[in-house]
Amino acid sequence: MSTYATMEKAQLSEEYKKLSEAYAAYKARGLSLNMARGKPGSEQISLSNGMFGVVTPETNFTTEDCPDIRNYGNLYGIIEARRLFASILDVDPENVFVGGNSSLNLMFDTMACLMRQGAGGKPWNKQGKLKFLCPSPGYDRHFGITEYFGIEMIPVPMTPTGPDMDVVEKLVKEDSAIKGIWCVPKYSNPQGITYSDETVRRFANLEPAANDFRIMWDNAYIIHDITDTPDKLLNIFDELKKTGKEDMVFEFCSTSKITFPGSGVAAVAASKSNLKLINDRYTYTTIGFDKINMLRHVLFFKDLDGVMAHMKKHRAVLEPRFKIVTEMLDKELSGLDVASWCKPNGGYFVSVDVEEGCAKKVVALCKEAGVVLTNAGATFPYGNDPKDSNIRIAPSYPPVEELQIAMEIFCISVKLASIEKQMG
């Protein structure tokens, strides 16, 4: 197959005409397809409908550390829920704080704690100009939190083994204004990269100039495997114990993509001193999170085996969708030298890098034909992708039939944008 870069102008014109006709036919169908965010589809959400029946008027609302969970109290969460999350994260239950439905909320509030209270020293907001490292491409909501607090974001290149640790180590060692880094260590958003053992160890051995430097370890996809060869992630807290730097990490996760996105349970794992920091803030904002929902999750799953059995059901729904995306990319774009893409073993996204300067055009073409994607640039701080090349595809939400059509339109859009670039 000839690449567009090697085609004669007449060939390109003929190819462009053919693609434009196909694109016009899709556009005429008046489609409305959405692949903008990593939302579980209805089929996935329904997997947890049995949870509605596990708490009844006859349920025993006395737990091991709470005489009546229907009342106030237990700010750290009921011990049974802390144990369940501890088993998922492979940490000690006493190092787990269980909150409401959103890990994003926990991340935001943790940043607010550090801004207002500090981390064993002067509050961040009393230290002048602050900076945060942002592995890119990355999660746009992480960047949104950082920008909200007025912290300067510094992009760090991603590699196949995680953030470029040579860059990370150099920057944090030289600049005390750098207060932290965002990480999605397993099946990163959007590239699906899992940090290598060496990368995790280098994080645990960081020597930042700021003694209140914190790693925001967003382990959102820790058990979201979709193949028979799932990635393995080294336990960051095991490595931190070796270096004596347990205070350096806050680890987050939730059941948002396991049970119900709007009414799951979230948790943060951290050292005792870091958990106290969070507890001190929440003492003024709530007298306890939804303990009945915590109990509902505990009764539904029972233990880690129950959680993992449930995740196999999610895999059965997600795996075919990821195959549609990667197989369509292979079929339509391989050999044209117009794009590259990841084939992750889990998570919620497929990351596609189109030709430099083409991402916004591709997203616009898709939108015009009825396919909504995440905005081009969203995977970089301030929405600024310097190469205008990265596009995040979220296959989970659309029904399979719609996903197939959406990917057909996506591939045509990539081709059209590439030919337009070649033809000037």
Image: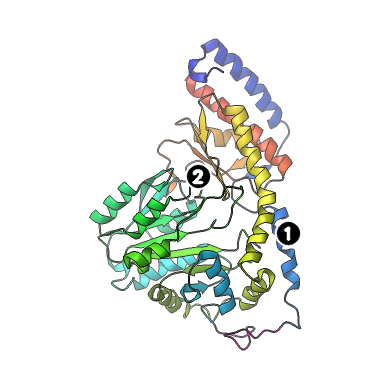
Residue 221, x across and y down, in percent: 55, 56
Q: Which residues are magenta?
A: 60-72
Find residue 402 and report its image quarter.
top right
Alpha carbon of mark 1 to alpha carbon of mark 2: how far?
Answer: 27 Å
In magenta stretch: residue 68:
yes
Q: Is residue 75 above or below residue 258?
A: below
Residue on which disc 2 sits: 191
- Is residue 186 positioned above or below 405 on the image? below
* Colour scheme of the picture: rainbow
Would residue 23 be counted in the magenta stretch? no
16 displayed left or right of 209: right
Which element is circle 2 on? loop
Q: Position of residue 241 (x, y in %)?
A: 37, 67
- The quarter of the image holding the N terminus is top right
- Give, as a three-letter code, the residue at label 2: Gln
Total numbered labels placed on residues in the image:
2
Examine the rendering and report whether any part of residue 248 can be seen: no
Q: Quadrant of residue 82?
A: bottom right
Label 1 Cα crowd, 10 Å radius (few <14 / some 14-19 / many 20+):
few
The crowding category of the residue bearing disc 2, from other C-alpha atoms within 10 Å (few below 14, some 14 to 19, many at least 20), is many
Q: Looking at numbered disc 1 in the image, what kind of residue is underneath it?
A: Ser
- Give the vertical position of 386 relative to 252 (above or below): above
Query: What secondary structure prevails in the magenta region?
Result: loop
Can residue 156 be seen here? The reply is yes
Percent position (x, y) of residue 51? 72, 68
Q: Position of residue 260 (x, y in %)?
A: 66, 62
To which residue does mark 1 refer?
A: 46
